[in-house]
Image (cartoon, rainbow, N blue to C red):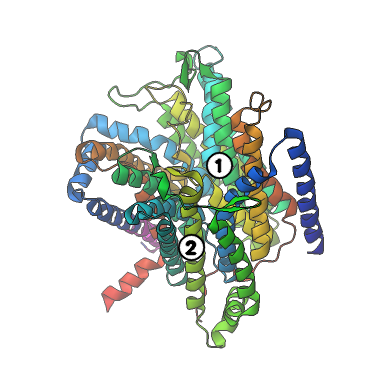
């Protein structure tokens, strides 16, 4: 455990040093990079914090990718319907919570195989997103919405920062506090470790788990709606591009700790921002094909997870349906 | 009769999940203002309305019986291998590299390009197995990341190294010496169906009839007991990834070497994208059995083939079919639905 922590600290330090010299080498502006990194971090952080809490309660949701995709599309639909980008974020959050509710219901009451149910959501989203793009906007695979629907960012000394990004950082701290300093947080952790004990204490394991599934789904839904409404300014049918699984990698890296999830999301988001910033630098873009730059987030994810996973301790009852004897 | 009971139960579960998927799909069709009954009638007509439609359905089924294999054999060995998509992309690129860029005598050429794509599929599957064994990286995360790396790598290879001169949108076409023969003109069914169905049938006998196959299933059913019995679980993991990779590579090749009229890979990967993921649903409908997968793939091929008619005549976008596949998977994930409904009916 302690070795794993030192490896993590060393990784972060190495990352910062490498980052500094890369900037010096390419003459990049740190603020624009920070902006790009924080944008890429936000959906990962939101989903990873929610999923950390969900997994602490003993559920696994690998349908985050699908939630990202569907809430991105419905979020844009909501923004257009209310003519307000922030309402689109709320709609995305509600859609995510609803999918979380379905997954929670299937896992808790119907004792579904959680990984297969999550894959079902992902496959459903892969078909549903292009279907919705066709039936809603009658255009295959892409939709650009009016740019006044974009949620405005704050101007700060370190660059433009989306309010959702600030919210995601706050949520990570609240999540940590919630898990370790509140009664409900204690029950959530107990439900993942010893559901029988929670049940004997007169607390409904099923309700705790459905609650965390809805919470995780809602945060992932907010992250999904963030992508078009605060970041890309449009929808494509592969909008999430594996980010739901990178969020899962953050959760694994963090060993289900919300604050470490935030750091992991920052590392992964930053690598993505850095890769794209370097890619458009004169002198680099002529030599390195764009395709290799596009691969970097995924390669980073594999390398980071493979080098730091070590001996993580996961809740004992994770992934197992609880049934009263 | 009693011996067939588990078999019958699994067929009932699949049929039930299919009905739920189609019902919810129909509700979606109705929700967006189309006529669901008309849509399903056109879907059926498009899939089985005549001889050429039926053969076309079989042509659609070919890759899915193969991309179902990695997930199916993975589950049998206790894994969730969802890397079929990336292995399939690179199998398709490998088929182009040998089938389009190298000239060889007929038949030998076809065998070489098919085998090479299977090898490349297995090579791409191998690292996920090693990461699982040596570093404990969950295969769901690693295989998805490898899928996306494979996506960009394949586009790079097609655009930079295997592009057809003067036509940027696709790869070199496959030389006539490396093409599977079209079985029925008026459909795109080629002899590659015998290769893919043969692969699945051989795999069935490998799993049920050999010692290694038995050990793999034992490792999946109860890892602790299997370890106690002296079974090498790591070997089972590696083997299931490699067999899955071979099947996925073959699936990619089947779309390049055995699917007119393109006989090439589009630079967007448009003619193969999604085949690997849909294979997960097909594997589950086929109850993670290679032979069951053949029947499930014919069902899914019928949906895809008929979906085009549904889109043409009723206007429902054919992407709905993949959403229905996801709904079927959701229903199959929760087998208790059936017993709950049965209890309700009995009351």
Both marks 1 and 2 on one chain: no
Q: Is residue B287 visible?
A: no
* Residue B343: image location, x then y, percent: 32, 75
Chain assignment, label 2: A
* Above or below B180: residue A156: below
* Above or below A183: residue B92: above
Residue identified by numbered label 2: A217
The residue lying toward the viewer, choosing from A16 and B114, is: A16
Measuring 51% from the left and 56% from the top, which residue is drawn there? A223
Report the side of A254 relative to A114 (left or right).
right
* Residue B226: image location, x then y, percent: 65, 59
Label 1 environment density (alpha carbons within 10 Å; few <14, some 14–19, many ≥20):
many
* Residue B202: image location, x then y, percent: 50, 39
Of the two numbered discs 1 and 2 in the rendering, the one whose residue sits closer to the viewer: 2
Chain assignment, label 1: B
Q: Is residue A61 visible?
A: yes
Considering the image in quadrants, where does the C terminus of chain B appear?
bottom left
* Above or below B43: residue B344: below
Name the mark on residue B100: none
* Residue A191: image location, x then y, percent: 58, 76
The residue lying toward the viewer, choosing from A125 and B10, is: A125
Q: How many marks?
A: 2
Query: Regarding mark 2 in the picture, which secondary structure is present there?
Result: helix
Measuring 50% from the left and 20% from the top, which residue is drawn there? B110
Considering the image in quadrants, where does the N terminus of chain B appear?
bottom left
Query: Regarding mark 1 in the picture, which secondary structure is present there?
Result: helix
Q: Magenta region: which residues?
A: B2-16
Disc 1 from disc 2: Cα separation: 32 Å
Main secondary structure along the magenta-highlighted residues: helix
Measuring 67% from the left and 55% from the top, which residue is drawn there? A264
Label 2 environment density (alpha carbons within 10 Å; few <14, some 14–19, many ≥20):
many
Residue identified by numbered label 1: B244
């Amino acid at each position: 455990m302690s070795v794993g922590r030192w490896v993590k600290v060393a990784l972060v330090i190495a990352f910062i040093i490498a980052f500094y010299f890369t900037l010096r080498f390419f003459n990049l502006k740190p603020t624009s990079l920070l902006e790009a990194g924080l944008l890429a971090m936000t959906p990962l952080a939101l989903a990873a914090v929610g999923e950390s809490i969900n997994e602490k309660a003993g559920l696994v949701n690998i349908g985050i990718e699908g939630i990202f995709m569907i809430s991105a599309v419905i979020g844009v639909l909501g923004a257009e319907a209310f003519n307000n980008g922030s309402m689109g974020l709320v709609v995305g959050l509600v859609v995510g919570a609803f999918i979380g509710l379905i997954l929670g219901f299937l896992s808790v009451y119907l004792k579904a195989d959680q990984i297969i149910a999550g894959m079902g959501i992902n496959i459903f989203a892969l078909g549903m997103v292009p279907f919705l793009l066709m039936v809603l906007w009658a255009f295959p695979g892409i939709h650009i919405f009016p740019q006044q629907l974009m949620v405005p960012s704050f101007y700060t000394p370190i660059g433009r920062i989306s309010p959702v990004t600030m919210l995601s950082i706050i949520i990570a701290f609240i999540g940590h506090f919630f898990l370790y300093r509140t009664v409900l947080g204690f029950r959530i952790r107990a439900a993942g470790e010893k559901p029988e004990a929670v049940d004997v204490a007169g607390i409904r394991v099923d309700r705790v788990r459905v609650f965390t599934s809805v919470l995780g789904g809602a945060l992932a839904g907010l992250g999904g709606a963030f992508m078009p409404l605060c970041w890309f300014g449009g929808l494509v049918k592969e909008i999430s591009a594996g980010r739901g699984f990178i969020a899962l990698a953050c959760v694994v890296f963090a060993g289900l700790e919300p604050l470490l999830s935030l750091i992991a999301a920052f590392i992964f988001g930053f690598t993505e921002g850095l890769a794209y910033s370097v890619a458009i630098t004169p002198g680099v873009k002529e030599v390195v094909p764009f395709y290799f730059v596009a691969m970097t987030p995924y390669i980073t994810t594999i390398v980071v997870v493979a080098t730091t996973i070590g001996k993580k301790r996961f809740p004992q009852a994770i992934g197992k349906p609880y049934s009263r004897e | 009769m009693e011996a067939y009971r588990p078999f019958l139960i699994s067929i009932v579960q699949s049929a039930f999940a299919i009905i739920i998927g189609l019902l919810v799909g129909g509700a979606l069709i109705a929700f967006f203002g189309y006529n669901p009954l008309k849509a399903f009638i056109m879907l059926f007509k498009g899939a089985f309305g005549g001889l050429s439609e039926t053969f076309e359905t079989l042509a659609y089924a070919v890759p899915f019986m193969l991309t179902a294999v990695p997930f199916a054999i993975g589950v049998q060995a206790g894994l969730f291998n969802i890397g079929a998509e990336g292995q399939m992309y690179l199998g398709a690129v490998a088929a182009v590299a040998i089938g389009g860029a190298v000239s060889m005598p007929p038949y030998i050429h076809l065998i070489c390009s098919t085998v090479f794509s299977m090898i490349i599929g297995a090579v791409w599957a191998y690292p996920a197995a090693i990461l699982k064994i040596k570093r404990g990286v969950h295969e769901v995360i690693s295989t998805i990341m490898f899928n996306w790396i494979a996506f960009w790598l394949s586009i790079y290879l097609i655009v930079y190294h295997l592009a057809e001169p003067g036509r940027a949108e696709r790869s070199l076409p496959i030389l006539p010496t490396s093409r599977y023969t079209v079985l029925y003109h008026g459909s795109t069914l080629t002899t590659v169906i015998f290769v893919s169905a043969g692969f699945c049938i051989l795999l069935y006998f490998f799993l049920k009839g050999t010692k290694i196959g038995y050990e793999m299933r034992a490792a999946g059913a109860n890892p602790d007991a299997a370890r106690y019995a002296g079974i090498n679980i790591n070997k089972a993991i590696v083997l299931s990834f490699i067999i899955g990779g071979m099947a996925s590579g073959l699936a990619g090749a089947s779309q390049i070497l055995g699917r007119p009229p393109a006989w090439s890979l589009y630079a967007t990967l448009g003619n193969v994208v999604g085949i690997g993921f849909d294979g997960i649903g097909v594997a589950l409908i086929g109850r993670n059995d290679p032979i069951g997968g053949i029947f499930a793939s014919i069902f899914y091929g019928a949906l895809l083939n008929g979906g085009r008619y549904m889109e043409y005549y009723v206007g429902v976008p054919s992407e709905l079919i993949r959403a229905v596949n996801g709904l079927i998977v959701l229903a199959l994930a929760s087998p208790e639905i059936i017993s709950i409904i049965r209890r309700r009916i009995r009351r």
